Image (cartoon, helix red, strand yellow):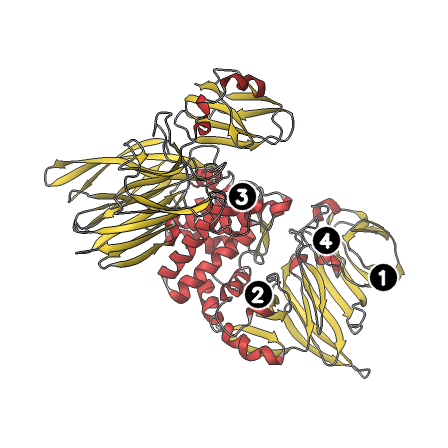
Amino acid sequence: MSSTKKANNFDVLHYDINLDFTDFANQRFSGYTTVTISAEASITEVQLQLEGLTVDSIVHDSQRLNYSRTGIHLDITLAKALKAEEQAKIDIYYNGKPEKDASWGGFYYSGEYAFNLGVAFTSNPHNYGRVWFPCVDNFTDRATYTFAITTTTDKKALCNGISKGVTVHGNGSQTFHWDLKQPIPTYLASVAIAPYALTQYDHNGIPVILSCLEEDSSNMMKSFEHLNGCIDAYLDRYGTHTFDRIGFNVVPFNGGAMEHATNIAYPLFGVDGEYTYETLYAHELGHHWWGNTVTCRTAEDMWINEGWASYSERIFLEWIYGKARYDEDISANHRAVLHYAHLRDGDTLPVSGIGHTNTYGSHVYDKGADMVHTLRGYMGDSSFFEAVQSFLVKYKFQDVSSQDLESHFQLHTTRNLNSFFKNWIYNPGFPHFSVLGYSSKRNGSKYATTIHIGQRLRFAPVYFEDVPMDITLYSSDFRTETFNVKLGKERQEILITTDFVPTYVALDIHKKISDAITDDAFMVSDTGTINFGNAMMTMKVKQSKDSSFVRVEHNWVGADAYFNDGKLPFVSRERYWTVDGVWNKGFKADATIEYFGRETGSNYLIGYLDVDLIRGTEENLVLMYRSSPSAQWGVCKDYTWEMGSKFDKRGSFTIHNVQKGQYAFGINEASRLSVKSEATLSDRYVTVYPNPTTDSLNITIEKALNGVLEITDGSGRLVKSEKILSDNENKSFDVSEWAPGIYYVGVVIENRPYNPKLVLVR
């Protein structure tokens, strides 16, 4: 942040904002803000922030003060020094037309409305109180507020807190008075002006105000039908509501909403008389706990505000519609995160330590919510919500960090949250866990089953540790026994004893942990079409003589590739499917999966999945199959192919009489087998040292501008992929956490891979 209370050696205690908005035609306002400060040391200067407005004068104790302005900073020279703990009230008189951010946020005039949105997506810092009142504009300086907002008599002004009445003047204007007793950061301060009609009531002792134009009132009440249930959900799950009221003001803004404390700016499109956008008001109300009661200390930890508010949407859905709806929404969000968070944000990122450009990106909102769900899965409901409620009490009206979350939540669980935060919060990427095989032996009246589990990585730098994972074993008659185990290695062996011979072993069947898998499972007892949407497969059941439990997993990592011993077809390094379950003997079905290898277009939900595989045209694609992870890949024996144009990189395969096992896309292109292509050119592009290595790997790349550096392990798994931005580049990687073995380092130029250098990591 550019300025903090500690750097200035003073604390703002209170803002008294007095503004005249009667000049609507010119979109200008004028007035003054009285800033009450308390010195923390002897000071002679006060620095505030104010942007885009003209200062008329600054007064303290009836005496004009000197001031200067540099950028957003307003530097005020006091007439005499303030001593430590001494307070002062400084009146800043100003006027002008307020500014908007280039992307999102700021002050808006639109028809009969004037309103602010307190954050700016592109401005630095993101806090945007400074566009309508002078302030210390950061996340850590909290103050109380009073407002006196003057409008023409056809309009109302709503601000934070509780109404203290209206003063009617004789000149066709009136002044609305509001008082907020709870301290908030400046970005949460709010004003909204329009010919509002107000609906006011109490719910569980909390005053609620819903405001919109009269013609929108009926639709707003219908759309907000579940608001009271949302309040109940958060009171139950998060604890006491800490503000004097809850308020939503409708504004004509098409880019979302803003969580101003007690006075949320809510878009007109969200009051359509339906439930279409109810998770939007659930998100904004969630901020009353996450963001407004506790606030991220820095923008780099915005997931504490936005990730938890996004997760609050799922708490709302669970409360109103039940656990199945919660699971559905969590799964849809998890799939979206795995599919395109890195595409939208331009990189694979951790949720904590986020950069300025991505403060309000997909990793913060969507992966942030995904991580809260996983933390709940780690801890269990009782411990998780106990930690949530005590955290919100302990840090009430304070700024917090991810480290504060970690240390506090650790007090409420025996799980290792240090490894959770290290792997899931402070590092990018995901783990991928899969059952590699299992075998059972009779042990008295029971059965001892040895289960082999493997861990792969999607965009993550190191293997995840101490991950609590449910293993569910199924009998042939659908009996189940579930065990929670701790996973944390590349390969792991688990011994489990059950009352029956298992015919199917499933990891995380209830989706408590958001690893690099999306899946669906159904009990099937009739013919028809089933959409395994999260697994990206459609199944047409042609015969089902009895019930079958069918589970399909979409694995967001490449297929294990001691797979085909360097032979064609080349198997996808991006994804594969696992089809399994407990099937009756008469079960028969066809299954369809789609490929999409284009890098352009706006439909993220179907695209960007097979770019690595389909580097040229698609006529050499094939569908691959293996019966188990220990079997070799081969071309599937019975499928049809809908290709369309061979140049659009889009089509589908339909598997006839689908079998249990794994399916993947492959391609018959010799150039894809990089270990066999143009060995004489490798020295031209890549030099690696030291080799062998134990801790670091240095790579020099020449004459490969706009190419891609690729590092794969001995099984063909893509470990690193980075764009080459210049003709001469030097890169260094920490390999101390890499599994010992052989790795290949090479470049891909114009979709053509060149023979990589072999590196031995010990």
Q: Quadrant of residue 629?
A: top left
Rendered location of residue 557, percent (x, y)? 41, 38
Pointer 2 residue: 243
Q: From this view, report whether residue 628 is shown above or below residue 214.
A: above
Rendered location of residue 238, percent (x, y)? 47, 59
Pointer 1 residue: 61
SS of the residue at dot 3?
loop
Residue 626 marker: none
Q: Earlier in the sequence, mark 2 or mark 1?
A: 1
The amino acid type of the residue labelled 2 equals Phe
The amino acid type of the residue labelled 3 equals Glu
Q: Are marks 2 and 1 in contact (CB under 8 Å)?
A: no
Judge left or right: residue 74 versus residue 644.
right
Furthest residue to the bottom? 170
Q: Quadrant of the C terminus?
A: top left
Q: Give the Cα separation between the discs numbered 4 and 1.
A: 21 Å
Q: Earlier in the sequence, mark 3 or mark 4?
A: 4
Q: Nearer the viewer, mark 3 or mark 1?
A: 3
Rendered location of residue 123, percent (x, y)? 70, 50
Pointer 3 residue: 599
Q: From this view, report whether residue 457 is shown above or below residue 372.
A: above
SS of the residue at dot 2?
loop
Q: Nearer the viewer, mark 2 or mark 3?
A: 3
Q: Residue at x 80, y 48 (%)?
A: 43
Pointer 4 residue: 136
SS of the residue at dot 1?
loop
Residue 465 visible in the shown view? no
SS of the residue at dot 4?
loop
Q: Quadrant of residue 132?
A: bottom right
Q: Earlier in the sequence, mark 2 or mark 3?
A: 2
Q: Are marks 3 and 4 in contact (CB under 8 Å)?
A: no
